[in-house]
Image (tube, helix red, strand yellow):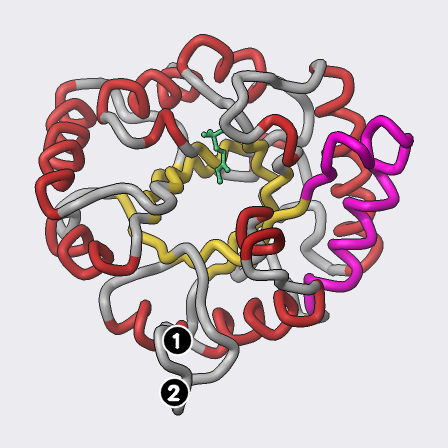
C-alpha cells in the first residue's frame, strides 16, 4: 500500500501540563482550523486525565480527537490512582498513548506491561499510540535498530491492525531537547519499523508510524516528507494553538 493511502496523524501530548484554563488554547485551535484550509491529516490532543472529559466536550463539534496518555491493563478494580482504558473511552477519548519513554523511565514500565496496556486499549475499543525509541547511549553504541525492533516485538501484541494501532518513534534524546536526528536516521528507523510491521501484520503496510521528538513548525515539513513518516507526536509545541497549527501546515495543500 502506498504512502498516500495512510492518512497522517498529528497528535499532541500535553504530558503533565494544562489546567481547565488551558482549554482556551483548544478553543483557539478550533477557530484557527475553521479559518484555514483543512489539513490532510487527522488531529488529536492527549491532555492529562483531568482534562480528557472537558476537552472532549470542547472538541465535540470539531474533527479533533482526544486521547489519554496511559492506562492500567485492567478494566476496573483496586488500583489506587490508576485509570482504565474503559474510563478514557467513557470520557470521550479515542486514542491512548502507551509506552511513552517517560513512563518506561519514570514508572519502570517493561515491554510486557506495555503489551498488556495495548491490549487494554483495544478491549476498550480505542486506538493505541505505542511509543518506541532508543536512548542516546543506545544510539552511540549502534543499537538503535535492535532496541526499536525489540520494543516492537515485545510491546506490540499480535492483533495489531492499521485501525487499532499507531506506532510513534521517539528517540529519547530528541524529546524536549531541540535536537532532531538526521533525516537519513529517521528514514532508516522508520523503514525498519515498517519492515517489522509488514512482516508481522496483514495491514502492516497501512499502519501509521509517527515521528516524535522536538517537532515544531520550523522542522515539521521536512520531517513529515521523510518516507514512512505518517505524522507526528508533539510535546511542547502542542501546548499553544499557534505552535500546534504551525505543525499542521506541513499537511496543508
Ligand atoms: P517534545 O515535542 O516536547 O520534544 O516531546 C515529544 C514527546 O515526547 C511527545 O510524546
Within the magenta stretch, is there residue 181?
no
Measured as percent of width and height from the top left, residue 112 is found at: 70, 70
Q: Is residue 97 above or below residue 141?
A: below
Tell me: is circle 1 under 8 Å from ligand 1: no
Q: Quadrant of residue 241?
A: top left
Q: Residue at x 88, y 37 (%)?
A: 143
Within the magenta stretch, is there residue 135?
yes
The residue tagged 2 is 76
Q: Residue at x 55, y 54 (%)?
A: 106
Count of marks placed on residues: 2
Confirm or deny contact between disc 1 and disc 2 (CB under 8 A): yes
Q: Residue at x 77, y 45 (%)?
A: 148
Outermost residue, right side: 142
Measured as percent of width and height from the top left, residue 210 is found at: 57, 37
Q: Quadrant of residue 160?
A: bottom right
Residue 98 shown left or right of residue 37 in the figure: right
Mark 2: secondary structure: loop
Residue 133 shown left or right of residue 59 in the figure: right
Outermost residue, bottom side: 77
Which quadrant of the figure contains the C terminus?
top left
The residue tagged 1 is 84
Our reading of the magenta stretch's main secondary structure is helix
Viewer-side residue, 116 vs 142: 142
Q: Residue at x 19, y 55 (%)?
A: 56
Q: Which residues are magenta?
A: 133-157
Q: Residues within 10 Å of mark 1 (few under 14, many from 20)?
A: many
Mark 1: secondary structure: loop
Measured as percent of width and height from the top left, residue 251 is found at: 42, 21
Amino acid at each position: 500500500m502506498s504512502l498516500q493511502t495512510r492518512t497522517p496523524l498529528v497528535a499532541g501530548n500535553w504530558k503533565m501540563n494544562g489546567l481547565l484554563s488551558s482549554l482556551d488554547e483548544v478553543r483557539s485551535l478550533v477557530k484557527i482550523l475553521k479559518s484555514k484550509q483543512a489539513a490532510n491529516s487527522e488531529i488529536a490532543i492527549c491532555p492529562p486525565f483531568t482534562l480528557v472529559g472537558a476537552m472532549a466536550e470542547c472538541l465535540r463539534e470539531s474533527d479533533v480527537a482526544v486521547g489519554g496518555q496511559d492506562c492500567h491493563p485492567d478494566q476496573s478494580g483496586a488500583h489506587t490512582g490508576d485509570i482504565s482504558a474503559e474510563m478514557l473511552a467513557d470520557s470521550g477519548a479515542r486514542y491512548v498513548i502507551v509506552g511513552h519513554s517517560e513512563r518506561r523511565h519514570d514508572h519502570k514500565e517493561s515491554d510486557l506491561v506495555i503489551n498488556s496496556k495495548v491490549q487494554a486499549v483495544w478491549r476498550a475499543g480505542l486506538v493505541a499510540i505505542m511509543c518506541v525509541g532508543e536512548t542516546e547511549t543506545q544510539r552511540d553504541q549502534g543499537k538503535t535498530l535492535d532496541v526499536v525492533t525489540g520494543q516492537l516485538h515485545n510491546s506490540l501484541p499480535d492483533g495489531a491492525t492499521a485501525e487499532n494501532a499507531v506506532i510513534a518513534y521517539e528517540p529519547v534524546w530528541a524529546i524536549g531537547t531541540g535536537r532532531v536526528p538526521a533525516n537519513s536516521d529517521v528514514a532508516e528507523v522508520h523503514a525498519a519499523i515498517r519492515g517489522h510491521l509488514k512482516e508481522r501484520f496483514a495491514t502492516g503496510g497501512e499502519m501509521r508510524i509517527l515521528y516524535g521528538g522536538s517537532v515544531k513548525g520550523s522542522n515539521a515539513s521536512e520531517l513529515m516528507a521523510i518516507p514512512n513518516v505518517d505524522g507526528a507526536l508533539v510535546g511542547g509545541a502542542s501546548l499553544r494553538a499557534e505552535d500546534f497549527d504551525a505543525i499542521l501546515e506541513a499537511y496543508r495543500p
